[in-house]
Image (tube, rainbow, N blue to C red):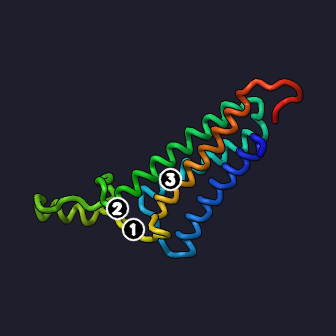
Amino acid sequence: MTAYGRILLAGAGSAALVLGALAFQFLGGLPPCPMCIWQRWPHVVAVMIALLAVTVLWRQRRWLAALGALTMLVSAGLGAFHAGVEWNWWEGPTTCTSGDITQLSADELMAQILGAPLVRCDEIVWEFLGLTMAGWNAIFSLGFAALWAGSFLWWRMPFEGAARD
């Protein structure tokens, strides 16, 4: 596969993940938690980077490939962190998980209830083959990062003869 092909595949994969998340949200009736929303942004950025790398900024394609790889590593990290929160391996942000309420006064408890998001980040709402959406996002993001990194390394290698794509 060519370096451009890898970038197009990674960008299309990111677009597919965002569209899939939106389908789960609007067609499947599964509203996202705040951490789910956070995980969408690196994919949106990756799609824009892919479009730039194969069109107007093709001369900067090597650095855009590196940026795409870093973006997908951020997405993988967010997905892995969120999966850990869902599986109760560690606590998530207090803005989207349930915390210890034993030390709260009645007023503080009421404020926490009223300020709580509609969807909690520490509840699993969908699972396939033992992995949550966040876990699958981490795996796919690592794969996309490998595609981006492969393009970066391909354009970095010296080449004699015809120009590299």
**Residue 30: % across, % down:** 48, 72
Q: Relative to 59, does residue 14 appear above or below in the rendering?
A: below
Q: CA distance from mark 3 to mark 1?
A: 15 Å
Q: Dividing the picture into quarters, in which one does residue 158 lie?
A: top right
Which residue position is annotated with label 3?
138
Name the mark on residue 87.
2
Decide: few, some or many residues near mark 1? Use Cα within 10 Å; few <14, some 14-19, many ≥20: some
Q: Quick one: label 3 or label 2, which is nearer the N terminus?
A: 2
| C-beta proximity under 8 Å, tags 3 and 1 | no
Decide: few, some or many residues near mark 2? Use Cα within 10 Å; few <14, some 14-19, many ≥20: some
| C-beta proximity under 8 Å, tags 2 and 1 | yes
- What amino acid is labelled 1 in the image? Ile
**Residue 71: % across, % down:** 56, 42
- What amino acid is labelled 2 in the image? Trp
Which residue position is annotated with label 1?
124
Q: Dividing the picture into quarters, in which one does residue 48 lie?
A: top right
Q: Relative to 147, does residue 60 appear above or below in the rendering?
A: above
- What amino acid is labelled 3 in the image? Ala
**Residue 139: % across, % down:** 53, 54
